[in-house]
């Protein structure tokens, strides 16, 4: 089996070979292929820019791999800011001895996910570090998008806004947890890892008055809602019963003592929508394969008291706390 | 001593605290402080975009640290493409147990180096991985610049072009090598790690006809010249005697069997300049503190035979090969 050698990261001949035989092969385009120190891009005057590093363990999981995740994650961070994803950079940090075949599988996934969303990888970097100094492979992606909808912001929620999720909660986190624990369920838990640009574009095209969007990755739904509450200084009320959670995800959480709302998604988006447009957003979501499980889960009930309140099925109310403590390392 | 915990990377409360107390403190600005999923930027219609990951070991070295390097490295990749560096993203991957004090020192360096060059950090991400799964700290920076000089390219060298280096060769690589081997020299070897934008801007302002620029990092001067020869399909001839190398760097190389031209710089730039403008470029470089040791080291002597020829002091000629093999891992 061919493996990654230190020489693949030395900037010399072997690096050039790796670039051509794996990276250009699967990610190549007219811009990347020039292999300059920086790529020259034509863009509109207002862009969105974001970065994310991916260290997920295991790097291959049900529903995706670290490559697909690295593209989808950054695409989604642009999309929720109302930006059409255009360009990605990719930085690999690879452990000496990593199988070339696995690397190629990961890079192929990246290429497939990028072309699904119409985004181009235009800049790259590869570092190889000696065995034992990194666990297998870490990937950073940074992304540039063209802003097509202005004013979306975590600071932008208002009393009356309706909170909608585009799908079930916690799927990615539960999948990684199950993989690590070696647990099998009757209905397998699959990561929701996928690029959400087209789903989000569809919502934006309706003209609905969306105030904020967010993909709840690390920290899950609870982290997003608490950040929104704090940044917009509003109180959000959530109906616990309305939060959609897949059966095996709920089972896993009960077994291991996790809250589904603390687990990451990687292909789900939370919306804060003006009340008159909630129905339009909900119906539009449900008409798309990625939004079939969309639900209204709550609303912004007031200004000036930054907190998230959970209404239980029995009518009781309690705080939905932001997650704290270790949670799951290397979930994304 | 306070240390990085897994909870600092979980996306919950502790992550928010780390962001505010270290990242915003040293890198904050009106854009970053909004803490959105992606930052919204106004840019000109033609931008340069680049990415680089930094894994240098040790993370603190004479002349800099991984933070300063991570800013300078990406700033320099933009600058050599004729772009004024404007915005950076920063992705940290940190080992559980890393000292918070060291992290703050690194982040402070980044802030200082960024403000020296007038570049803003506008996007960030932090991952913490369990002890033993990464060696201390890795940093990715991606950068966006505004193109102020078009047409610079590794594909752009022409017969007659004069090759100029802005300073001595191999300083950064030799410094890291000496630190790792615990070697002390009478004259200490210091990394040349620094941002080159203002030096390069000064050259561009002269209007001199520069065809290509490159900062010779991994693979050193030999890698840059060989890539230029190949991408522009030209033959480059270099006078070995003219290559400026600091005495202790030369001594270290002789001792350990390295070629100075294979060692990385992190604050030096190589130019290919139209013959009529070589004098102007050389004099302008020498009038700047970062270019005092600038030298003409060679020229493009023909088209259609992609190679780099080294003329020795005795008049003999041999190929200057692109470096191959392991070289030094984790040099940058």
Image (spheres, coloured by chain):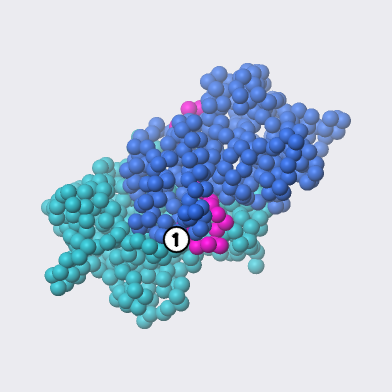
Chain colours: A cyan, B blue
> Quadrant where the C terminus of chain B lies?
top right
Residue visible at 35% across and 35% down in the picture: B42
> Is residue A209 visible in the rendered structure shown here?
yes
| Residue B133 among magenta residues | yes
Residue visible at 33% across and 47% down in the picture: B36
Chain to which the residue tagged by mark 1 belongs: B
Query: Based on the displayed image, in which of its 4 quarters is residue B218 positioned?
Result: top right
Residue A180, how many percent across, how many down?
46, 72
Q: Say which element carries label 1.
A: helix
Q: Which residue is mark 1?
A: B6
Residue B202, how many percent across, how many down?
55, 22
Instruction: Say above or below: A128 vs A63.
Output: above
Residue visible at 26% across and 48% down in the picture: A231
**Image-based side of A217 in relation to B240, left or right:** left
**Image-based side of A218 in relation to B326, left or right:** left
Residue visible at 78% across and 38% down in the picture: B251
**Which range of residues does the magenta coloring cover?**
B128-152
Query: Based on the displayed image, in which of its 4 quarters is residue B279 positioned?
Result: top right
Give the class, few, some or many, for how many residues have Cα within 10 Å of label 1's Cα (few <14, many ≥20): many
Q: Nearer the viewer, residue B254 or B297?
A: B254
């Amino acid at each position: 089996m061919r493996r990654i050698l230190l020489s693949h990261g030395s900037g010399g001949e072997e690096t050039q070979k790796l670039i051509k035989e794996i990276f250009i092969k699967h990610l190549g385009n007219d811009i990347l292929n020039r292999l300059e120190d920086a790529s020259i891009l034509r863009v509109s005057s207002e862009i969105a820019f974001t970065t994310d590093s991916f260290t997920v363990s295991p790097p291959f999981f049900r529903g995706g791999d670290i490559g697909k995740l690295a593209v989808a994650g950054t695409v989604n961070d642009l999309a929720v800011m109302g930006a059409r994803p255009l360009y990605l950079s990719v930085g690999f940090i690879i452990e000496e001895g990593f199988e070339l075949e696995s690397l190629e599988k990961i890079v192929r996934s990246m290429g497939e996910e990028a072309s699904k969303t119409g985004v181009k990888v235009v800049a790259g970097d590869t570092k190889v570090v000696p065995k034992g100094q990194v666990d297998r492979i870490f990937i950073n992606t940074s992304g540039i998008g063209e802003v097509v909808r202005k004013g979306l912001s975590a600071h932008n929620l208002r009393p009356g806004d309706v909170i909608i999720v585009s799908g079930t909660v916690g799927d990615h986190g539960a999948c990684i947890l199950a993989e690590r624990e070696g647990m099998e369920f009757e209905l397998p838990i699959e990561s929701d890892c996928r690029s959400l640009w087209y789903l989000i574009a569809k919502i934006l095209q309706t003209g609905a008055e969306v105030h904020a969007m967010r993909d709840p990755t690390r920290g899950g739904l609870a982290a997003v809602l608490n950040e929104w509450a704090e940044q917009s200084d509003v109180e959000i009320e959530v109906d616990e019963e309305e939060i959609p959670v897949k059966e095996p995800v709920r089972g896993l959480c009960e077994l291991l003592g996790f809250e589904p709302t603390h687990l990451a998604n990687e292909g789900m988006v939370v919306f804060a929508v003006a009340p008159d447009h909630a129905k339009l957003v909900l119906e539009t979501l449900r008409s798309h394969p990625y939004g079939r499980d969309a639900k209204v889960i709550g609303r912004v009930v007031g200004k000036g008291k930054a907190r998230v309140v959970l209404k239980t099925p029995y009518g009781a109310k309690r705080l939905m706390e932001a997650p704290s403590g270790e949670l799951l390392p290397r979930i994304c």
